[in-house]
Amino acid sequence: VQPNNYSTFYDDQRQNWSIMFESEKAAVDFSKQVCIAKYNSSPALDAVLCQDLLLGEGQGVEGGDSLEIAYTGWLFQNNGLGQAFDSNVNKDKLLRLKLGSGKVIKGWEEGMMGMKKGGRRYLIIPPAWAYGAQGVAGRVPPDSTLVFEVEVKRVKLVRECSGSDGQSVSSRDSPAPSPVPNSDGFSAD
């Protein structure tokens, strides 16, 4: 999904297609359906399928970076979006996680790499990258494919070195200045 209600994608011949929609919501909904269709047309897919819905701004996150996210998770049922099983959207508390720490499912670790602050992404996660044969009692049946919509609300990038004035310097160069961090080191909304 691009600015001004455009959605751009490549077909199986690597041909680039752009479509203009009447609204951002229509472009996002179309992009979600393309992601679902791609998953359904890829037999035995053993990788996380990602579709950016909004790119966000700043540097893309990498392993070791800390995020605060809003998310909703659904079961993938009958070749489409099934029942929601978890969400923190419209709740007071965001989920905090550190990429690469192994505290969340492997599909999230992989699927959120490269996201930027303010970015939204649709993830389709096969069982091997989610809860596998165990599932989650009462919520996620064994061997379930999961669908998540995640939004990065705050980011704390890994800091590796300090400048001569004692200021922290990001380990990655960025063409845009970093937002000023609040007291806990997460960039403010």
Image (cartoon, rainbow, N blue to C red):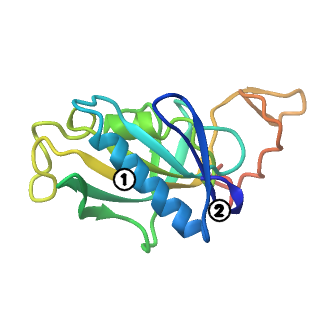
Horizontally, residue 59 falls left or right of residue 38, namely right
Residue 103 seen in this snapshot: no
Q: Which one is in front, 156 or 72?
A: 72
Which residue is under mark 1? 148
Residue 72: x and y, percent?
37, 61
Pair 1/2: label in front? 2
Residue 153 to residue 55: above or below: below
Q: Which one is in front, 18 or 58?
A: 18
The kind of residue on which mark 1 rests is: Phe
Residue 160: x and y, percent?
68, 25
Q: Residue furthest right?
A: 165
Which residue is under mark 2? 5
Residue shown at the point (44%, 38%) measured from the top left: 111
Horizontally, residue 43 falls left or right of residue 98, namely left
Structural distance between the alpha carbons of marks 1 and 2:
22 Å
Residue 60: x and y, percent?
63, 38
Task: Say which element carries label 1.
Answer: strand
Quarter of image, res 167: top right
Q: Which one is in front, 36 or 116?
A: 36
Residue shown at the point (52%, 30%) measured from the top left: 63
The kind of residue on which mark 2 rests is: Asn
Residue 79 to residue 17: above or below: below
Residue 112, disc: none
Circle 1 packing at 10 Å, graded few (<14), some (14-19), many (20+), is many
Circle 2 packing at 10 Å, graded few (<14), some (14-19), many (20+), is some
Horizontally, residue 89 falls left or right of residue 163, namely left
Residue shown at the point (78%, 45%) measured from the top left: 178
Q: Mark 1 or mark 2: which comes first in sequence? A: 2
